[in-house]
């Protein structure tokens, strides 16, 4: 998501599931939608059947998505940037780009700081001691007026377009084939099919999932695609976009709500230690436009932030105390899960609470996670199911060999309700907030999650009220306006994150006009104010529960445009837009690039943007005002050059997985793997080499299972009862393994045993002159459930994280395999 | 082809069970020829919900027995795809089609439990005892380790020594309340499944 936010301004899927049917070309890469998102995948088959679309699948395995593809190309796991960088090179050298779009809607014309360099695999500013970049040189050139200097002729050697060309000129078809193992002709065929959609009225849509995120270069893999889509002019278009297929039902929502170490709701951020001054904190986030006339919507940051603080601290948040600025924690660094478990492993954490989360199964290097949990004083697990994490201290023979007597952690297991036992909303991949209703009570004494959180908070608040303690003010003053304090209702909470007027909110253009009376629900985030007159718990969700009622529960599935937009079904953030950046679906004059797929268009008579979707643009911004379609970016346009947004470079570069089967990087042998990735000292020592562990391993899901839950469900356990691994026929022959044999798969960190499935779906590839085999490892088994007990697949995976998001590298590591 | 609602449900049910039935040598023709039973959903209450697994967000209809009277325990007996839903249009995948077995899994937890240091078993405890003890442990840790100021005098008000993982299958409402509560405590060692 960091990749999409860096490029377009928002970290979310750009289009939506049904819109996939409008595509001319669908590319599935870094995912396997047919198995992992089956009911969304139906819109791919719809595109094929009714829009004559071409489906391309690029994957190390011939997946079920590949089985219905028009064209399939194999690729070595972890080498996608080389492939996509090669695609960029192909588009640029064959002049297959949407010129008008690139010139007007991207930063191609922007000039870059003279200090920016890329040499020998490193960007300028690298410090080998800290494994981090000083990003000062990754910037645009600014003129005396404070705006970025541009060159509309695209001739200047320092303009983004020319730096882009130069950067990817190394990614020739030969180099791509050498690094990825994809045969040259197959790579070129994929390029040719995708390149055809550079025509303004043709679109490609990309669908990806965890096959891209879970790499030490995951963020940059996705960004490469985002750049491809900009060159093709496919963002904002119906049937275009980047469809980020999230893994969980509400991972988008939890991210939107800021449940990450450094975030607050609505992609607001916590302050760093150095940001002691409130005004400086706000100014740094309220981005001023980098080009004349741009919306730079984050300029409204103070209104979003102050409204959040009013929502949390009510009357205690005043202008005089900077709206309780000091009550929010400040960060010295980001405490992502790898960092937290590293600290836990070092014995620096005392307590841990896992709510609906199974870290022993879900995090890399199970042995390390297990040792870390054993260092805790207390562990609290809140879950509907008996998870492995809750019983990490129990001996399950070969699947969990621990000595309970030696583990001093106190463990609490609290039973929670599940989706069927509550009211509430989830945000699906395409930003759609859908309301659901309770069907039965939780079993036994189990309680809803909100009730558990409230119960714990009320106990804590009581202790701080009666005994005092460390900094009790925010705890004592946290607003808790719920009718039953021990059990806040979903409706109350949803109304709170939508926001309400605390005082009359008036129209800035006409102060006599009241937009929302004091006490009323707000209609949307445009009504938020920075003077304390509004409260809003998550600005991007504003509009979800207005004075009219619960917009998330709307069930009008009519589709007036025929393009599948269903604007009155539930509520999509932001502001009920279904295709974001939709201004980019029109040319400079406001005319759709493809009139058959009109999303919005400029109506000169009405002096309004109008169409089937909510315009992602100030509704009255006439085209001649040149307001760019990427309204969250201060540039007004999308970024081909990522400036300083990501930790590992403004342009994506291919780096090898940390456990590389090659031992070198053909592009720059001196810099093999991502120099800015997250890797702790002990974990570096737990990395294996290709000499000992010669085969590439990759983990994935099966269509019959969901993570580590469905092994608790009988029907799924019947469909896929027992742990297995997949290997290709060549490797099976080499190792004397037959289908059905028990095998041991080992990495530097541990081993698992499973049944071998020998398949034609996995083929050996020639990479950098070597024949490389891949071992496929489905993840769904463990030592709790109604399926046959098995090993946690993450026994094998390395504790290495992406440079920007710290997502672990589950998708590529090294193993060896033997008959058990 | 015209498909009635009834026929449609039969096809859907066949989708998951059919392949296994065929493996066992049963022909679906025989099953269809059986005597017609009373439609089991006639007396149920329908409730709309969303599949909690992947991010497609398929609409589902849950049918339950019980008339919602105070002294009646409602039980969900059937879950199917919501035909009105614009994305899944009534279909469900093998995961969604088995949701009933998740909500009624034998491994659902029914009451709070406690495992003492060094122990090899669970002990059932009350909610009050569990939440009281957890709150006490959290407060002890927070009071002992809360960082109000750094050594060089910067106000930071953070609590690092207890960590949290939030659930990405939990509702927005739960997620919002969780974040609100944790930040008031100064928690920063907080994450969800977004990173993994």
Image (cartoon, coloured by chain):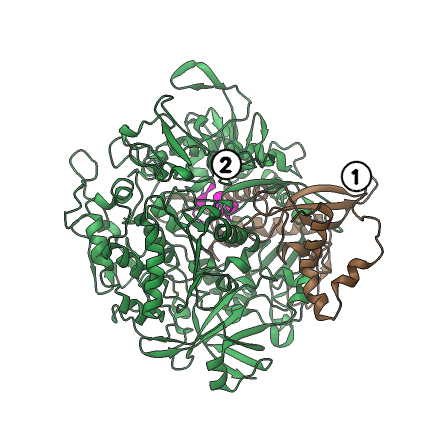
B160 vs B169, left or right, is: left
Tag count: 2
In this rendering, the answer to whether A660 lies above or below A736 is above
Between A517 and B64, which is closer to the camera in this rendering?
B64
Task: Give me the chain letter of mark 1.
Answer: B
Is residue A718 in view?
yes
Q: Which residue is mark 1?
A: B68
The picture places residue A451, in percent across and down from the top left corner, at: 65, 43
Could you tell whether A451 is left or right of A84 in the image?
A: right
- Which residue is pictured at 47% across the width and 86% down the height? A734
Q: Which chain is green?
A: A
**B28 left or right of A649 in image:** right
Q: Which residues are magenta?
A: A252-265
Image coordinates for residue A725, horizontal then vertical, percent = 54, 74
Q: Which residue is mark 2?
A: A541
Q: Are callouts 1 and 2 both on one chain?
A: no
Which residue is at the far front? B1
Chain B: its colour in the image is brown
Magenta span contains residue A634: no
Which sits in the foreground, A69 or A442? A69
- Does A454 appear above or below A34? above
């Amino acid at each position: 998501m960091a990749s999409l936010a860096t490029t377009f301004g928002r970290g979310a899927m750009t289009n939506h599931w049904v819109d996939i049917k409008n595509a001319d070309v669908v590319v599935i890469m870094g995912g396997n939608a047919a198995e992992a998102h089956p009911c969304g995948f139906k819109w791919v088959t719809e595109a094929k059947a009714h829009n004559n679309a071409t489906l391309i699948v690029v994957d190390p395995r011939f997946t079920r998505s590949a089985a219905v593809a028009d064209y399939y190309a194999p690729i070595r796991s972890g080498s996608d940037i080389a492939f996509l960088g090669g695609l960029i090179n192909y588009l640029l050298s064959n002049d297959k780009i949407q010129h008008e779009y690139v010139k007007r809607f991207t930063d191609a014309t922007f000039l870059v700081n003279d200090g920016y360099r890329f040499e020998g695999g490193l960007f300028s500013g690298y410090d080998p001691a800290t494994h981090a970049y000083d990003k000062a040189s990754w910037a645009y050139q600014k003129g005396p007026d404070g705006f970025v200097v541009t060159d509309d002729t695209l001739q200047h050697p320092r303009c983004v377009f020319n730096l882009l060309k130069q950067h990817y000129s190394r990614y020739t078809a030969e180099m791509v084939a050498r690094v990825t193992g994809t045969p040259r002709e197959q790579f070129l065929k994929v390029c040719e099919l995708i390149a055809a959609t550079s025509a303004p009225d043709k679109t490609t849509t990309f669908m990806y999932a965890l096959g891209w995120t879970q790499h030490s270069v995951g963020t940059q893999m996705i960004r490469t695609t985002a750049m491809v889509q900009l060159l093709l002019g496919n963002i904002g278009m119906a049937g275009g976009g980047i469809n980020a297929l999230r893994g969980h039902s509400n991972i988008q929502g939890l991210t939107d709500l800021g449940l990450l170490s450094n975030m607050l709701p609505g992609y607001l951020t916590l302050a760093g230690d150095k940001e002691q001054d409130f005004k400086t904190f706000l100014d740094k986030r309220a981005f001023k436009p980098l080009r004349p006339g741009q919306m730079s919507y984050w300029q409204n940051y103070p209104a979003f932030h102050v409204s959040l603080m009013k929502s949390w601290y009510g009357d205690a948040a005043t202008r005089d105390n900077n709206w309780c600025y000091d009550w929010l924690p400040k960060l010295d660094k980001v405490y992502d899960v790898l960092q937290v478990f590293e600290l836990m492993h070092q014995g620096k954490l005392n307590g841990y609470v896992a709510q609906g989360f199974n870290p022993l199964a879900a995090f890399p290097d199970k042995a390390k996670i297990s040792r870390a949990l054993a260092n805790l004083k207390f562990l609290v697990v809140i879950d509907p199911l008996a998870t492995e994490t809750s019983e990490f201290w129990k001996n399950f023979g070969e699947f969990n060999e621990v000595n309970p007597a030696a583990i001093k952690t106190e463990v609490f297991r609290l039973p929670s309700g599940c989706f069927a036992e509550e009211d509430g909303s989830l945000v699906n991949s395409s930003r759609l907030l859908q309301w659901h209703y309770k069907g039965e009570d939780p079993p036994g004494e189990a309680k809803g999650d909100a009730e558990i959180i409230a119960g714990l908070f009320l106990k804590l608040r009581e202790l701080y009220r009666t005994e005092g303690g460390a900094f009790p003010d925010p705890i004592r003053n946290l607003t808790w306006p719920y009718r039953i304090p021990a059990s806040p209702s979903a409706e109350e909470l949803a109304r709170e994150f939508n926001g309400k007027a605390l005082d009359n909110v008036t129209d800035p253009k006409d102060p006599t006009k009241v937009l929302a009376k004091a006490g009323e629900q707000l209609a949307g985030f445009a009504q938020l104010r920075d003077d304390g007159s509004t409260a809003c718990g998550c600005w991007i969700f504003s509009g979800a529960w207005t004075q009219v009622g619960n917009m998330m529960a709307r069930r009008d599935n009519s589709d007036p445009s025929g393009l599948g937009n269903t604007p009155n079904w539930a509520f999509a953030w932001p502001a009920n837009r279904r295709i974001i950046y939709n201004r980019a679906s029109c040319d400079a004059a406001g005319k759709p690039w493809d009139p058959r797929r009109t999303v919005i268009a400029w109506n000169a008579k009405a002096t309004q943007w109008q169409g089937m979707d909510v315009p992602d643009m100030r509704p009255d911004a006439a085209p001649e005002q040149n307001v760019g379609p990427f309204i969250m970016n201060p540039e007004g346009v999308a970024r081909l050059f990522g400036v300083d947004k990501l930790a590992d470079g403004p342009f994506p570069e291919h780096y090898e997985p940390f456990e590389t089967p090659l031992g070198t990087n053909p592009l720059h042998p001196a810099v093999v793997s991502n120099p800015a990735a997250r890797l702790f000292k002990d974990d570096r020592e737990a990395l294996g080499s290709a000499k000992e562990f010669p085969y590439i391993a990759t983990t994935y899901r099966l269509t019959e299972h969901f993570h580590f839950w469905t092994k608790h469900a009988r029907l799924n356990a019947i469909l896929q009862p027992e742990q297995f691994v997949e290997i290709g026929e060549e490797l099976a022959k080499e190792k004397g393994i037959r289908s059905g044999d028990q095998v041991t798969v080992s990495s530097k960190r541990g081993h698992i045993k499973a049944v071998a499935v020998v398949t034609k779906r996995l083929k050996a590839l020639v990479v950098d002159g070597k024949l490389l085999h891949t071992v496929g490892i489905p993840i769904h088994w463990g030592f709790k459930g109604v399926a046959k007990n098995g090993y946690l697949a993450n026994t094998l995976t390395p504790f290495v994280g992406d440079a920007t998001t710290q997502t672990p590298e589950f998708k590529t590591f090294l193993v060896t395999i033997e008959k058990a | 082809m015209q498909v009635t609602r009834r026929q449609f449900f039969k096809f859907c049910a066949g989708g998951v069970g059919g392949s296994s039935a065929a493996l066992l040598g049963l022909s679906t023709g025989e099953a269809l020829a059986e005597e017609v039973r009373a439609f089991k959903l006639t007396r149920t209450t329908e409730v709309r919900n969303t599949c909690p697994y992947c991010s497609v967000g398929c609409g589902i209809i849950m049918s339950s027995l019980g008339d919602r009277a105070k002294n009646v325990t409602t039980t969900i007996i059937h879950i199917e795809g919501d035909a009105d839903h614009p994305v899944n249009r009534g279909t469900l995948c093998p995961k969604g089609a088995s949701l009933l077995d998740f909500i009624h899994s034998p491994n659902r937890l029914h009451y709070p439990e406690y495992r003492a240091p060094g122990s090899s078993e669970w002990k059932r405890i009350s909610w009050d005892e569990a939440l009281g003890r957890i709150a006490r442990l959290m407060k002890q840790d927070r009071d002992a380790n809360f960082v109000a100021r750094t050594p060089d005098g910067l106000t930071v008000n953070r609590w690092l020594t207890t960590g949290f993982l939030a659930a990405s299958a939990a509702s927005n409402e739960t997620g919002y309340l969780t974040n609100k509560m944790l930040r008031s405590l100064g928690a920063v060692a907080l994450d969800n499944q977004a990173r993994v």
